[in-house]
């Protein structure tokens, strides 16, 4: 008797995550691309003031990750995600209300709300992947939805080029355009999302496949203090430290290209698109690679860490980005490193659902994300001051750290979590 067809509804759910993550990064990226134009033609920021705006976002984002992760684990993915996207969309629109008299302080206030709301995106996505995919597919699914970060970063300069004038005269309009996209997604999510066990469009065969390598879980909630007390939480937090590097590419990349090669608003679009297209490939490829290793029979521990090591090696040449006078060589090195980071990120996120029960995944994701974001805050404080004092030479140290951090992080992860043994329903270790 032939086996029943498994079905593919889970990939529709993943597509919704991809769409939301794309919108998340469009909103997040707008200011990074507009930054040099707003600084030079409208608001006259210093690099230090710009770093304060970035720090405001990251400070709120760090606490948003922590708070939203706990909320999503408690009230569920459907309601939690809607709350998250609603919050960030409202504060994204508030950027348009900032005037010259308010200056960088107004942007910092708007970024606080944006950051807190956006903190819910990745905890919600990782929890959804844990609920909707078996372990052997989670890295690939994560890599695909995580590719939305790059699509968002690609679409942001295109939207800006289409809407904003060459001197930034219509910069406010882009924030309303993206809010309309987010409202459309919220309606779609509200109408279509349910957990697999109760979803009317999911076949019995696909539900069985989704649950095939997961252990049954109780409905008892796991408090933060218990999550914080296990070393696997801190292994994931170390895996998220390189988020500081990704924030550097996202928020300082256009400033580096402007300082090193004189690229202004129109000239930045193509280099940034190249960087994030290549990063997109890395995100999907990184998820596919570790999933392929697992399907070959490799243990999850070996598959994930081998992939993370390959990512670390691919990233290292970015240390030479400041040593070339050729714009496209620098763009190529950054693009390769961005691809490596996204491949790393797809596998780092999957470590959570590999080790923790589903009901704790959003909380752990939030804790790790908070640690990575605080690393980004520290980097902003140092880099903003360094650039004002030393000029573009300060970028050398930023790219040096960007190239070497991943290999160091992997070594620490292995020391903390050498075997990646899954934790039980109440975070108990197997005997």
Image (spheres, grey):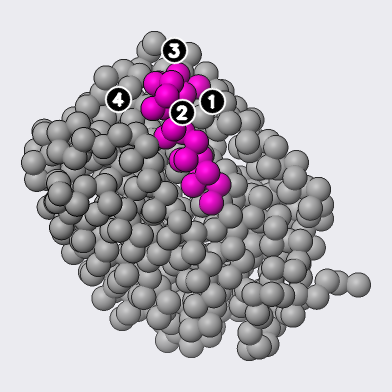
> Which class describes the residues within 10 Å of circle 3: few (<14), some (14-19), or many (20+)?
few
Circles 3 and 1, Cβ within 8 Å, touching? The answer is no
Answer with mark 2 or mark 3, whichever residue precedes in sequence.
3
Please report whichever mark, 4 or 1, sits nearer to the chain's N-terminal start: 4
Residue 177 position, x and y percent, is 16, 57
In the image, is 56 to the left or to the right of 140? Answer: left
Is 259 located above or below residue 130 in the figure?
A: above
What's the CA distance linking mark 3 and mark 1? 15 Å
From the viewer's side, name the closer residue of 44 and 302.
44
Q: Which residue is mark 3?
A: 324
What residue is rendered at 15% in x and 38% in y?
Answer: 42
Q: Position of residue 3 (x, y in %)?
A: 60, 74
What kind of element bears circle 2?
helix
Residue denoted by label 2: 386
Q: Is residue 377 magenta?
A: yes
Which residue is rendered at x = 64% and y = 75% of the image? 224
């Amino acid at each position: 008797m032939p086996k029943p067809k498994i079905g593919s509804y889970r990939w529709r759910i993943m597509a919704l995550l991809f769409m939301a993550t794309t919108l998340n990064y469009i909103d997040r990226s707008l200011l990074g691309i507009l930054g040099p134009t707003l600084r030079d033609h409208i608001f006259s920021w210093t690099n230090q003031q710009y770093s304060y705006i970035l720090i405001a976002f990251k400070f709120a984002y760090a606490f948003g990750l922590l708070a939203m992760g706990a909320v999503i684990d408690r009230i569920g993915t459907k309601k939690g995600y809607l709350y998250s996207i609603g919050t960030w969309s409202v504060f994204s629109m508030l950027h348009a209300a900032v005037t010259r008299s308010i200056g960088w302080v107004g942007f910092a206030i708007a970024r606080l709300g944006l950051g807190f709301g956006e903190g819910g995106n990745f905890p919600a996505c990782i929890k959804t992947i844990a609920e909707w995919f078996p372990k052997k597919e989670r890295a690939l699914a994560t890599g695909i939805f995580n590719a939305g970060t790059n699509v968002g970063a690609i679409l942001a300069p295109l939207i800006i080029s289409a809407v904003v004038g060459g001197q930034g005269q219509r910069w406010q309009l882009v924030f309303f355009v993206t809010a309309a996209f987010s409202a459309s997604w919220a309606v779609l999510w509200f109408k279509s999302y349910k957990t697999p066990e109760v979803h009317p469009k999911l076949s019995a065969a696909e539900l069985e496949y989704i649950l095939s390598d997961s252990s049954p879980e109780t409905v008892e909630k796991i408090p933060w203090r218990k999550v914080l007390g296990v070393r696997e939480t801190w292994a994931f937090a170390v895996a998220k430290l390189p988020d500081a590097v990704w924030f550097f590419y996202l928020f300082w990349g256009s400033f580096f290209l402007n300082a090193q090669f004189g690229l202004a608003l129109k000239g930045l679009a193509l280099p940034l698109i190249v960087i994030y297209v290549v990063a997109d490939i890395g995100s999907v490829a990184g998820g596919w690679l570790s999933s392929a290793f697992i399907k070959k029979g490799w243990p999850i521990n070996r598959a994930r860490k081998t992939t993370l090591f390959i990512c670390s090696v691919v990233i290292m040449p970015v240390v030479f980005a400041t040593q070339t006078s050729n714009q496209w060589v620098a763009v190529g090195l950054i693009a390769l490193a961005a691809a490596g980071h996204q491949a790393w990120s797809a596998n780092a996120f999957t470590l959570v659902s590999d080790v923790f029960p589903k009901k704790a995944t959003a909380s752990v994701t939030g804790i790790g994300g908070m640690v990575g974001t605080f690393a980004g805050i520290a980097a902003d404080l140092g880099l903003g001051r360094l650039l004002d004092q030393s000029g573009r030479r300060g970028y050398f140290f930023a790219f040096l750290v960007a190239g070497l951090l991943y290999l160091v992080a992997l070594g620490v992860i292995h020391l903390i979590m050498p075997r990646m043994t899954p934790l039980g329903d109440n975070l108990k270790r197997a005997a």
